[in-house]
Image: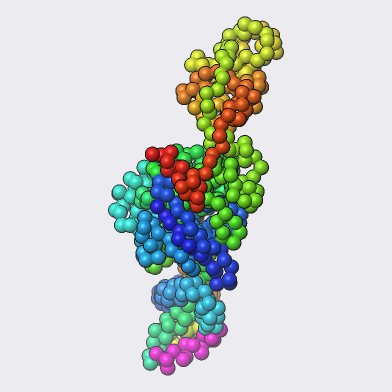
Amino acid sequence: MIRFDGVTKQFPDGTVAVDDLSLTAPTGKITVLVGPSGCGKTTSLRMVNRMIEPTRGSISLDGQDTGRMDQAELRRGIGYVIQHAGLFPHRTVLDNIGTVPRLLGWDRTKTRDRSRELLERVGLDPHLGDRYPAQLSGGQQQRVGVARALAADPPVMLMDEPFSAVDPIVRDQLQDEFLRLQDELGKTIVFVTHDIDEAIKLGDQVAVLRVGGVLAQVAEPSYLLAHPADDFVADFVGRDRGYRALQFQATPRLPLRSERTVVLGERPDSDAGWLLVVDDDRHPLGWVEPRRIGGRAVEDADLHRGGTVARADGTLRGALDAALSSPARRGVVVDDSGALVGTVLAHEVLSAIEDTDRPERDEDDPVHGGAVAVAADEA
Amino acid sequence: MDWLAANWRTVLDLGLSHLYLAGVPLLVGLALSLPLGWAAKRWRGSYPAVVTSTGLLYTIPSLALFVIMPLVLGTKILDPVNVVVAMTIYTVALLARTVADGLLSVPDHVEQAATAMGYRGLRRLFGVELPLAVPVIAAGLRVAAVSNVSIVSIASVVGVSQLGNLLVDGYRRIIWGELLTGIVATMLLALVLDLVIVAVSRGLTPWRAAAGARS
């Protein structure tokens, strides 16, 4: 657990970057600091490992005041991922990953083994280990940055906009893999971003900061979207928040209808409307319009692939999106294995949405809003 | 050519002492410039003072410096140490700034990463900063090497033997072969030192070649 206790940072020129910040980042959870530039989010992050010293207040790690710890020792115990990865250009990928273990005095072989293991863990080909950072793509460098931060298995990780310098598709991948990794590792993470979508996707808890380093609101993402504390937060979380909030709402039982299907290479048995094409395991492949193909067998090229697929145990956002994106206007719903369960119409999803409650404040902890609810979910 | 054929042993001896008089100060000067350059980076306020004061040393006329040295060091007037020390001063004059600039050329995000990983002190200097400063330092070293080889010639005037002797003697006695040999040998020596520095620098920075090879 990382605790900010009345932390203020005033720079020598008089600028107040962080103003009386009190915040707890719970153990094993991702706490995202988000806000516009000048809101002090990076300054707050860097005060945790004392790259910046607070002017007032204190920060503690599991109850230990970081101000009393040796700086270098403290830092070696905290994984740090920076924007643009910040890899050492003169060291190979494996040597970069092994940086902190070597500083901690691990021997060469053990460091090397650990570095190899991590290279694989972050989804990189082992043969990249002997390359130099300049020989990698931006996304690969960022993965190496994450591997380097994990190398000595620190319980705490600080991440400063780690995914902002890569293109959107790669960013999405990196975020998904990061969440998968966090599921396995359960680190205590403080993550800084200016991107509210990223904050909502990754955070167990999101802290919104405003310019001047004042904490505007801290809550779990769904609560933040449903109940912005003030105009600034409402503005910052953005326009589509009603729709985006659906991604935190589990799908209730939807009135699924069964769908007529056809397999590739088969002749459709009717001419009416849209037919769903599935493979032998009943995994949906796409839609066809039988009257367009004129009675011959369905080929791969006939498939209309515009529709997204929702999981029966997924979120309401997924279900609504499946319905809205389907050319047949019927959203495809699948089970865990990806096999077709049935289809659902947009208005049916909407009435399901009308029947669900918005996330409510946990009255026991007015400061942290929904943060406690996260912990409760775990128990 | 006839002159060289008859005197190649002398030329070789003079060449070796030229290499010694120019080369040793290069290494000693580099070693002295490292802490100076590091200090100029560490305490940013001292950068102008360090760079200016060392740079000014280069403006002292070499002949004057050679003559003053015995007075300062208490050495004999013909002692080669006088030349070695004087040349070291010139090397520092050129390299202190280069080392400071080299260390300052390390990208900011790399410095931050080094701090965040828990690097400090000498380990940080030798593990991260210096290796990345090698290209800039090597560039400065090449200038210093050529400059040293050229200035050392003047030491003939104070009686310390090296390739400059061929120029002085050849000029006085008007022996064209000797003059030409002196010029060519000096240039060759400068070229060899330059190539050695380039090779060592390449050897220390395999990552640069790798970066360049990226398609």
Residue for point 56% across, 48% down: A164
Q: Nearer the viewer, residue A320 or B167?
A: A320
Residue for point 39% across, 90% down: B73
Q: Is residue B204 above or below residue A345?
A: below
Is residue B150 visible in the rendered image? The answer is no
Residue A370 image offset from top left, x and y in percent? 50, 45
Q: Nearer the viewer, residue B57 or A225?
A: A225
Q: Judge left or right: residue B197 versus residue A273.
A: left
Magenta segment boundaries in residue numbering: B59-73
Which scheme is used to colour this image of the protein? Answer: rainbow
Quadrant of the snapshot with the C terminus of chain B: top right
Marks counted in the figure total 0
Residue B25 image offset from top left, x and y in percent? 43, 77
Is residue B90 visible in the rendered image? The answer is yes
Quadrant assignment, res B7: bottom left
Residue B99 image offset from top left, x and y in percent? 49, 70
Residue for point 49% across, 68% down: A55
Magenta segment: does it hold A321? no
Residue A339 image offset from top left, x and y in percent? 50, 20
Magenta segment: does it hold B66? yes
Q: Nearer the viewer, residue B13 or A176?
A: A176
Residue for point 54% across, 68% down: A10
Secondary structure mainly formed by the magenta segment: helix
Q: Is residue A93 above or below residue A337?
A: below
Q: Is residue B212 above or below residue A305?
A: below
